[in-house]
Every structure is written in structure tokens, then in C-alpha cells.
Amino acid sequence: MYPLGFYRDKNGELSVQNIKVSELAKKYGTPLYIYDSEIMKERYDIFFDTVKEVKGSIHYAVKANDSINVIKFFSKLGCGADIVSIGEFEKCIAAGVPANKIIFSGVGKAKNEIEIALRNNILQFNIESEEELYDIHYIASKIKKKANICLRVNPDIAPRTHKKISTGEKETKFGIDFQNVKEIYKKLHELDYISPVGLGVHIGSQIFDFNFFNKAYFNLKVLADDLRKSGFMVPSLDLGGGIGVDYKDDIEPNFIEYKRILSNLFLKSDYKLSFEPGRSLIAQAGILVTKVIRNKKTKDKNFIIVDAAMNNLIRPTLYDAYHKIEHVEKSESPKVTADIVGPICETGDYLALERNLNYIDNNKFLAIKTTGAYSSVMSSNYNSRADAVEVMIVNNKDHQIKKIDTIKDIIAKEKLIDFD
Ligand SMILES: Cc1ncc(COP(=O)(O)O)c(C=O)c1O
């Protein structure tokens, strides 16, 4: 047997299940994303155990990693999905997720997206404005299909996370102002093709202080109880996602505390609860392997220039995110402090700054850890760079899960104009 996840084998080589990461890097080339299905299963089991007492349904937030195989894996374990575009919807269908387990979130659902989702009997729309309600009602009445509507509430809570992933404050574009929710919820009942199903919150991502969840869920419940007292049906509450992942020290979030919050608030109620975890299910399951192109030394600094770049992993430059970086093979060379940078012509193209690690020779591999979530899914072809290969390890076997766009494919998407 072998340890769970990415571990060092007896020769100090980074491995996953029974496979050496360096072998995968040689076989598939770099940059290379590797996902370990066993970590995905472990993360799902932990989340499931946390919410089972309150009978919560889990809807994997596809935005974290929209690989069809990732969606399918979680779906086979019992997850539904939380989506924010019809593209993600189609991916879920391709992955075998039943439409009646899919929640459509997002502030800007287009009319054609609403119609496709409705025709396919999607579970519910989490709506974020009164204007959206009328758009959905118009389409629902046109095709004579009732839409299940949940109101996403903006609870005006700042959960102390990076400002670009904080979604629960009133200045953000998300949700319906707390004070307007009652009035809009009443309106749902006046529309023939709308079925009100409840209220939801999602206050942001990378949340470690669970008091913020407690506050948001408590306020949501007060609002829902109040609506019920006024005679309205509020069958369900969607509690969103947002549980943080420790990229530096791998400290486990306090799931026991999360479970206690849920039990305290909801065990004695009959609300049907749903959850939308993304990052906490998939972040730790992925690594990005990259090859050193060259070491560059200036008067002031060392640079390790690698073949992965911000087009493969934008988190460091977009969110000031920290990812652990390790040698793939065993190394006992002296320590250096260096910026680990990609080949893209942007000063912001870095994967780590001022990182202290063993000196690494050209053509050797580095592993960028905890890159399962918001990583490959945010990639682009900037600088006409092809995608990274993606591989999933299942039962000791590596499976390439994505055919990559080569430069030829990228060129083939464009059409030359005859300028003569
Ligand atoms: C509505 C909604 N639900 C769920 C999520 C998933 O959050 P996380 O990946 O932090 O669990 C997000 C992420 O932004 C979201 O916007």
C-alpha cells in the first residue's frame, strides 16, 4: 500500500498512488496537471460526514474545476452540481449529472441560458435580482414550464478573505439586499410560472473563520422563519460553498465546528439544506508539474524560469495566492532564494516570489501543489501558449482526461481574411 495523496516514496521521489510523478511528466510532457481521485474521494467523504446529520445535499461547484471527469467522479459519489453558465450545464449533462440535481447560480444568466436550463428541467435557479425574476418568468410563461426559484440573499457580511473572492458584502454585485428579500419573495407567489423554493447565501471563498458562516446562516434562517410566519412556503435553504483550504500548511479546516454550527441552527428545523462546495472538494487533489527551462541570475535576484506560466495558473498573480512548490525528484542541493517565473512577457507572470528551495538544474521538474481548484479551469492561451495536459490517477492508473489544444488547433480556430 501507499500513503494517501502526493507523497515521497522510499527514494524521496514525489509519487501518487503507485506512480512516480517524474514518470508522468516524462510520459505526457509539461506543464502537466495531475489529479488524484483518492484525495477527491477523501474530501467528499469528509464533507458528506459533515452535512449528513442535517441531511444536506451536496452540489459540487463546477466553477472550481470543470473537467468532465471531475464532475462525473463527484456525481458518482452522489453530488449534484452548482453551475454559473449553460456551458457548465452542458458539461454536467455530458458527465451524467441529472438536470434535476443542478442549481443554476450567477448574477448574469442570459435569456437563452435560462430557456435551455428550464426546458431541461433544471432543479432551481438561484436568482440575484428582481429583474432576473421577471426575465425568468417571461421565458417560463412562454414555454409553459414552471421555474423553481431560490433568492440569493446578500447578507452584507465581509468574511475576511481576499477582496476578489468576497461575495457577501453589499457593495458587491451578488445577491439581493437583505431588506428587499421579503418583498421580492412575496412577489414570487404572484407569478403563475414561478415556484418559490427558498433562500440562499454564498458569502465568498477561502473562509477560515466559521463565525462568518454562523452569522450568515443565522440571518438567513431568521429571514426564512419570518417568511414562514407570514404564511409563505420556504422549503429549502442553500448555504453555498466557501470553506477555506490551507495552501501553506495543509491545516484541516475545522469541519467539526462547521458541523456544530449546522446542527445548532438546523437540526430541529425541517429546512431542506443544500451546499455548494468547490475548492474544498478538489483543491488538494491536484498538482501542476513544470520543467525548469533555465536558471537566470541577476545582480539582485535569482530566477527559476519554468515552462508553466500565468496562463496555466493565474492564482499567484490574480489573488496573491501562495502555492507550495517542491522538487519532484529527491534533491539535496544547497538552498537558493528565487522567483519562480514563467515565459510570458508580463512582470506578473510568476508562480512564486522569493521562494527558498533547493537549487534545481535545468530540465528538472517542480511540482506546484494544491492546484486542483481555480487553476487549470482559469487557464488561457495567452502568448499563444498551448494548454497543459491533464491526467487523473484512478486505481493506480493514469488517464489523460483532456485532449490538449496544440498550437495547430489554436491557429485552426482563426480565419484568415483576404486583404487584397
Ligand atoms: C454561488 C457560489 N457557490 C459556490 C461557490 C464555490 O465556492 P468554494 O469553491 O469556495 O467552495 C462559489 C464560488 O465562487 C459561488 O459563487
Image (cartoon, rainbow, N blue to C red):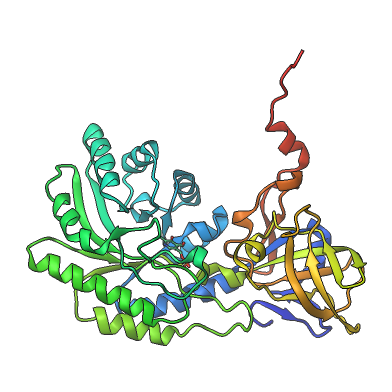
| Residue at the image position 31 percent from the left and 80 percent from the top | 262
The residue located at (77%, 82%) in the rendering is 9
On the image, which quarter does residue 391 sit in?
bottom right
**Of 187 and 101, the residue lying toward us:** 187
Res 231 seen here: yes
Viewport quadrant of the C terminus? top right
Name, please, the residue furthest toward the top.
Answer: 420
Residue 323 sits in quarter: bottom right
Would you say 42 lies left or right of 203 here?
right
Relative to the observer, which residue lies in front, 165 or 394? Answer: 165
- Where residue 272 appears, as percent x and y from the top left, is 25, 68
Q: Is residue 81 above or below residue 354?
A: above
- Location of the N terminus (image quadrant): bottom right
How many marks on residues? Answer: 0
Q: Position of residue 251 (x, y in %)?
A: 57, 85
Between 43 and 383, which is closer to the camera in this rendering? 383
| Residue 358, percent from left and from top | 85, 80
Image x and y of residue 239, in percent:
34, 68
Residue at 60% over, 73% down? 284
79 shown above or below 142: below
Ligand 1 shown in quarter: bottom left
Residue 278, can we see it? Answer: no
Specify the quadrant of the image occupied by residue 245. Answer: bottom right
Question: Left or right of 275: which side holds 13?
Answer: right
Q: Is 339 displayed left or right of 372 in the figure?
A: right
State the residue at coordinates (72%, 54%).
388
